[in-house]
Image (cartoon, rainbow, N blue to C red):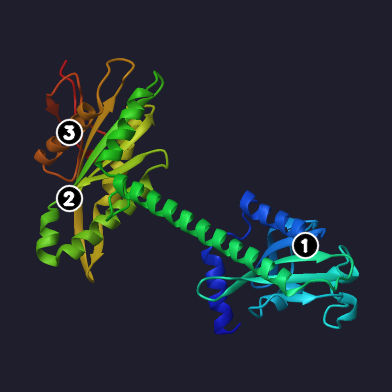
Amino acid sequence: MDQDERQRLRKLYDYAVLDTEPEPNFDRLAWIATRVFRTPIATLSLADAERHWFKARIGVDGQEMPRRLSFCNVTIGGDAVFVVPDAHADPRFAAAPAVIASPKVRFYAGAPLIAPDGFRVGSLCVLDTEPRHDFTAYDADILRNLAGTAVELLEARSRQSELARQTEEIARLAHHDPLTGLANRRLMHDRLAAAIADTRPERRIAVFCLDLDHFKDVNDTLGHAAGDALLRQVAERIRAETRESDTIARLGGDEFAIIVPDCRTQDEAIRLAARLIEAVCGRYVLEGQEVEVAASIGLAFGEGHIAPIGAGDLLRNADTALYQAKSAGRHCWRLFDPASLAWSRSPAGDPGGTLTAQAVR
């Protein structure tokens, strides 16, 4: 494949139209072509690497045909309208599949679809099962202008798709952290509020606040680029321990939050806290150097069916538990107990030998 063909295909693929569903505007062009030229067949085809794919078609059953031995393959080789009055009398096409088999084409006229940058991405053609010698220069002008309209539709479609993509990207950036790709604080609050509104007796909401211990030391010794790399790696380790239904957010700096909207038991949440401590704490390679990193976690539960709690309050509870974990020496997790703010050591056998809040009785 030569360079020109690669560039032509790149232009075609930029339209992102191959193998898409029918669209009324393109179908309408094919319909108009059959009425103007009084032919039973019209196609608006796009020339892929090995095939002509029909974006619109009338009088043709198939969705595509091979480029080899096709009329349209000659059409996209030039800028002018290509006409074959009688395929049986033209040695280039007398044995072509579309001539000797259905639809048994005898007459063909096709105009190339020429993109603004000059690449010929396809063709608009009319075909008949009878030979015709009455296709004039005036007819060719009409067909060429219809093909130009098809290109304008492709360009408009492309601009609309790009606008939609940009709008989607703006919406994504408004709700996600640009460094890690995680949810940002705004999206996290929305997800948490939705989870609280959907709380049921058989499930609880678990919220984790995770903070890296001595993160500032990494920035101070290795630089902010290393700190950013560390945050991205931490995000990946958290992802590996959570489910798609969970929400992971970066709240800012080195603080993360995880929402588990359907945590069935306290033990399930505690096991996740222990796994997160094990996964996040450890060695990282930053700027070619190995760095030991530790983290602290605060954990809180919300049970809206028992005592309604707002998203802000639930997050503050988890943050309070995080503060207690840091006060207890870091590199551990703490569980917030709404019944009491009295903190004591976890009973023997707790996962990871960490600390947890216990109600005083």
Q: Which mark is residue 37?
A: 1
Distance of label 1 from label 3 (alpha carbons): 78 Å
- Which element carries disc 2, helix, strand or loop? loop
Residue carrying label 2: 253
Q: Residue at x 18, y 20 (%)?
A: 359
- Residue type indicated by callout 3: Ala
Residue 75 in the image: above or below residue 264: below
For label 2, the crowd category at 10 Å Cα-Cα, with few meaning under 14, some 14 to 19 and many 20 or more, is few
Distance of label 1 from label 2 (alpha carbons): 67 Å
Given residues 133 and 88, the one toward you in this image is: 133
Q: Residue furthest front?
A: 138
- Which element carries disc 3, helix, strand or loop? helix
Q: Residue at x 26, y 37 (%)?
A: 208
> Which of the two discs, 1 and 2, sits closer to the camera?
1
Q: Quadrant of residue 290?
A: bottom left
**Residue 200 place in picture, x, y as percent:** 40, 20
- Which element carries disc 1, helix, strand or loop? helix
**Lateral position of residue 251 relative to residue 194, left or right:** left
Residue carrying label 3: 321
Residue 189 in the image: above or below residue 163: above
Residue 263 in the image: above or below residue 47: above
Q: Of label 1 and label 3, which has the lower sequence position?
A: 1
Given residues 29 and 77, the one toward you in this image is: 29
Residue 127 is at least partly visible in this image: yes
**Residue 210 place in picture, x, y as percent:** 22, 43
Distance of label 3 from label 2 (alpha carbons): 18 Å
**Residue 158 place in picture, x, y as percent:** 50, 59
- Where's the C terminus, which quadrant? top left
Given residues 228 and 266, the one toward you in this image is: 228
